[in-house]
Image (cartoon, grey):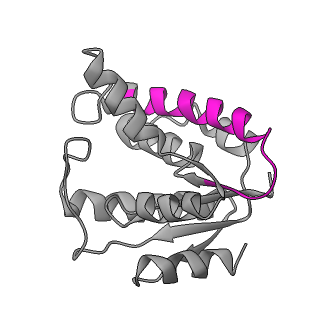
Amino acid sequence: MQNFFVISGCSGGGKSTILSALDRQGHATICEPGRRVVKDQVQNGGTALPWIDLAAFAREAMACCLRDYSAAARLSGPVFFDRSLIDAVTAFEHATGSTEYRAHAHMYRYAQTVFLAPPWPEIYKPDAERRHGLEDAKAEFVRLEHAYQAFGYSTVLIPKAPVAARVNFILSRV
């Protein structure tokens, strides 16, 4: 879907803040699947959490991504995703070494340009849903940058700048 724009990259790099700003401007946005999975699992006493069972968490995130993809197909104009199916497939592959879901990443396509939030130590903060440290977040960024390029996407780094400038940077390339 050429109007499905992914904002991915480093955990704690400001992606959700950018998506919130885009949403306030009236753009269609899809919240991060991983955070929704974590909230659901914690509320229901589940174990599909990245710090307990990363593979199960990634499977849940993939299912969430597929639901989001179908729901977004009914929207008009650009749709901005806080992470995508590629992120979940990459997490699963990292956890298991298995490539069994790679075909999903080829079947469910997003716009060619993917925006990546780079590691930004000055704004990184762990929280109840992001329990890993900055070094793990940096390693995740490297995996995601490689994965998006391996799946044929062009990646563009979002500059470390105030939120409004980051939003304008993205919108100028959409």
Look at the picture and state if 164 lies above or below 68.
below
The secondary structure that dominates the magenta segment is helix
Viewer-closest of 131 and 75: 75
Question: Residue at image x 67%, y 36%?
Answer: 104
In the picture, which quadrant includes the C terminus?
bottom right
Horizontally, residue 145 falls left or right of residue 110, namely left
Q: Say if residue 105 shows up in the picture.
A: yes
Please state the horizontal and vertical placement of residue 138, each as a whole percent of the image.
30, 65
State which quadrant residue 44 falls in: top left
Q: How many marks?
A: 0
Horizontally, residue 46 falls left or right of residue 112, namely left
Horizontally, residue 63 falls left or right of residue 56, namely right
Please state the horizontal and vertical placement of residue 173, each as a whole percent of the image.
70, 78
Please state the horizontal and vertical placement of residue 22, each as a whole percent of the image.
57, 63
Question: Residue at image x 41%, y 39%?
Answer: 34
Please state the horizontal and vertical placement of residue 25, each as a whole percent of the image.
61, 65
Look at the picture and state if 123 lies above or below 92.
below
Q: Please say whether residue 69 is one of the residues in the magenta stretch.
A: yes
Q: Please say whether residue 76 is one of the residues in the magenta stretch.
A: yes
Look at the picture and state if 29 lies above or below 46.
below
Q: Say if residue 143 shows up in the picture.
A: no
Question: Residue at image x 33%, y 72%?
Answer: 119
Q: Which residues are magenta?
A: 57-80
Viewer-closest of 130 and 106: 130
State which quadrant residue 68 falls in: top right
Viewer-closest of 158 and 162: 162
Question: Residue at image x 36%, y 57%?
Answer: 140
Viewer-closest of 63 and 149: 63
